[in-house]
Image: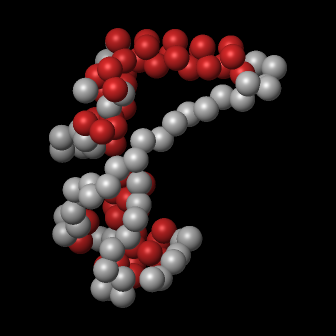
């Protein structure tokens, strides 16, 4: 096992067949490939998820504005899902491809 905390080195090792696979978050991995490899090499990598884990956004219950921040976040999410902004943002990061259903908020799947 070769552990690296440098995404650029990891992607380059993968491209040179010095490692067989890399664990990356969906958009982080795609962006890293686009950033560190020539365009003709990016299409040679698969983004079929073999394992997926949800992420959570948490707010501190001890922060003086924690409850308010959570409410504002939820209000903002509801607004951008309703007005189409949420999908517009996702389309920006998934150009020319189908948006991965796993990145959609659970009430939009």
Q: Which of the image's four quarters has the N terminus?
A: bottom left
Count of labels in the image: 0
Quarter of the image with the C terminus is top left
Q: Quadrant of residue 31?
A: bottom left
Residue 37, image x, y percentages: 33, 71
Q: What residue is drawn where x is 31% and y is 80%?
A: 20
Residue shown at 19% from the left, 69% from the top: 44
Going by the image, does 98 lie left or right of 78? left
Query: Residue 60: x, y in percent?
Result: 72, 29
Picture coordinates of residue 92 (x, y %)?
A: 32, 38
Q: Can you say whether 55 is above or below 2 in the image?
A: above
Which residue is pictured at 25% across the width and 36% down the height? 101
Q: Is residue 56 above or below residue 20?
A: above
**Whether residue 62 is visible:** yes
63 or 26: nearer the viewer: 63
Give the quarter of the image for residue 106. Answer: top left
Where's residue 56, x and y in %?
52, 36
Residue 35 visible: no
- In the depicted view, which residue is nearer to us: 5 or 59? 59
Q: Image point 34% across, 50% down: which residue?
A: 52
């Amino acid at each position: 096992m070769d552990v690296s905390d440098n995404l650029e080195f990891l992607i380059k090792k993968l491209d040179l067949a010095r490692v067989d696979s890399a664990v990356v978050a969906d958009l982080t991995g795609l962006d890293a490939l686009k950033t560190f490899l020539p365009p003709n090499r990016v299409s040679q990598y698969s983004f079929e998820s073999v394992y997926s884990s949800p992420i959570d956004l948490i707010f501190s219950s001890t922060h003086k504005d924690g409850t308010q921040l959570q409410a504002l976040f939820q209000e903002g999410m509801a607004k951008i899902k309703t007005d189409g902004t949420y999908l517009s943002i996702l389309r920006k990061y998934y150009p020319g491809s189908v948006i991965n259903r796993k990145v959609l908020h659970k009430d939009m799947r």
